[in-house]
Image (cartoon, rainbow, N blue to C red):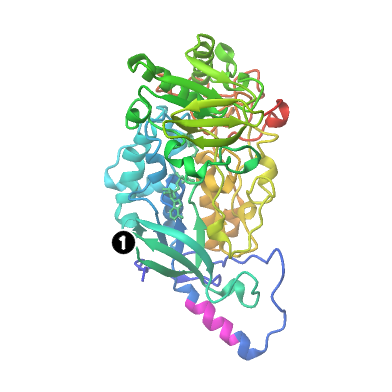
Amino acid sequence: MLHRHGLLRRGRSGLLLNSTAPACRPHKDRQAPRFEPPHQRMKQEDSMDSVKTLPIAVIGAGPVGLATAAHLLERGLEPVIFEAGPTAGAAIEQWRHIRLFSPWRFNLDDAAVRLLEPTGWESPRPTALPYGGELIDNYLTPLAATAQIASRLQTGARVIAVTRQGMDKTHVRDRDTTAFVVRVEHDGGETRDHTVAAVIDASGTWSTRNPLGTSGLPAIGETSAADRISSPLPDVVGRDRAAFAGRRALVVGAGHSAANTLINLADLAKDEPGTRILWAVRGSSADKVYGGGDADGLPARGQLGSRLRRLVEAGTIELHTGFGIAALKNLDSHLSVEAVDGRTIDADVIVPCTGFRPDLEILRELRLDLDPAVEAPTELGPLIDPEFHSCGTVPAHGAKVLAHPEKDFYIVGMKSYGRAPTFLLATGYEQVRSVAAALAGDQQAADTVQLELPETGVCSADAGTSCDVPAAATTASEEPESVCCAAPEPAFVGFPTGLAHGRSGTTNQ
Ligand SMILES: Cc1cc2nc3c(=O)[nH]c(=O)nc-3n(C[C@H](O)[C@H](O)[C@H](O)COP(=O)(O)OP(=O)(O)OC[C@H]3O[C@@H](n4cnc5c(N)ncnc54)[C@H](O)[C@@H]3O)c2cc1C
């Protein structure tokens, strides 16, 4: 079992901890029966006692999952981290060739840094903008290798379901004091149930992209065309070059992922004759992807937009507007992509830059409280709804906002934003600091949420649907002097996601 801490004590919350107060939160929904006969109460106390000896499951070893573990350890709580991939940062590994838009100083978690420092780790230059690969090599890999994390990290361990021990979703009695069961598929094919005291889901959204079809459903034929659909951010000039060189590539979507891929494809086309670049957007123009051009508040993003516009105007990129995809026909030699209005495009490979959604299936047996549109916790949803917000600011938030009716269960990190694309690491690090405090019973620390940020945040509003993808195709490797949100946008104290310039501010998006 996972109790390697010499100084662990039990809190009344039923969790192993260092601090004194228990985590105690009333149910938001149906309450357990109020009267309990003495023998029943004793049984319940016994069961609470045995739950107290269990570790806390963290799902996913991305930056937020590892930060969660670091904060739990600081609180004297005992994490066990399940990571589906072969290493920590497995999702970022897929976009290691993309440069982040936020500099190092916003990408490191404080508790994680406190674990790293005694190992002789050198902090990267705070103003430098790292590539995804650098985030892995210079931060996540050394963090995962620290003795404290390495001994608690299980890789090749995919969580396929979470539930309460011995009860399905409909059972109320003793629910709050019953252990969780996390069902894990381990590499090699073995499936095991792990019993834990609490669960923190930091599994991100990378593995569940939105479908190509309109209406939120896959286009007809999308599943059988899977072998001609790439990952959402392929490395077209590097690792994935062979799949794109000399071929017809159709990029679908109107965010910065699409912009990055299109520009990289244009670079590829210079060296690889026969490469054709097609771009389909649902809206009536691509203006919002071009952003503010040279007047853009974020210079690197402005350069990206201007370059993209020039490539479209020069005919290097063939833009198809108003192209909502209805069906894909996988012909022998290529794909025929059919729009809702009957137009067709022939392509050899499709790049789906259509955004992501959370995998809620693994949480099916838990009592969740999610915003019906965004699939983020109900209180958070309206603050980040992409229908109304692009990149503004969302107030710092923690355990209280992220709580569900299922006591001691939290969704954090990218997945906590549901379908909203504007999540930032710094926001996630504050989430997990607060959640660890709440689980340790330190309600005051859990409720005191704050982010130390520059006056303008780290990206500005209006130039796209999301902050999810940086100005990777630019050469800037340092944070610009004013990282973002320069005029004409209002200045905010806080990190982006929430200025009223979302889809509802544009037409046909
Ligand atoms: C291209 C791109 C650029 C970005 N740039 C920035 C930026 O500059 N600044 C910023 O603040 N944010 C940025 N973001 C947004 C966000 O910070 C990142 O997506 C970040 O990786 C989110 O961290 P996470 O730990 O929540 O999720 P992830 O990094 O996605 O990690 C989740 C982990 O969980 C694992 N996992 C998934 N399912 C399971 C399962 N069922 N069982 C076990 N393990 C599982 C995955 O393998 C993965 O390792 C960017 C996002 C993208 C896509």
Q: Is residue 147 above or below residue 286?
A: below
The quadrant of the image that shows the C terminus is top right
The answer to which quarter of the image holds residue 95 is top left
Would you say residue 418 is visible in this rendering? yes
Residue at figure coordinates x 36%, y 71% from the top left: 1
Nearer to the camera, 125 or 252: 252
Q: Which residue is drawn at 28% across and 47% down?
A: 119
Foreground of the two, 32 or 343: 343
Tell me the chief SS of the magenta region. helix
Q: What residue type is labelled 1?
A: Gly
Crowding near the residue tagged with mark 1, few <14, some 14–19, many ≥20 C-alpha atoms within 10 Å: few
Q: In this view, does 362 lie above or below 104?
A: below
Residue range of the region highlighted in magenta in the rendering: 42-50
The residue singled out by tag 1 in the image is 188
Q: Which residue lies furthest to the top in this view?
A: 314
Looking at the image, which residue sits at the far left?
120
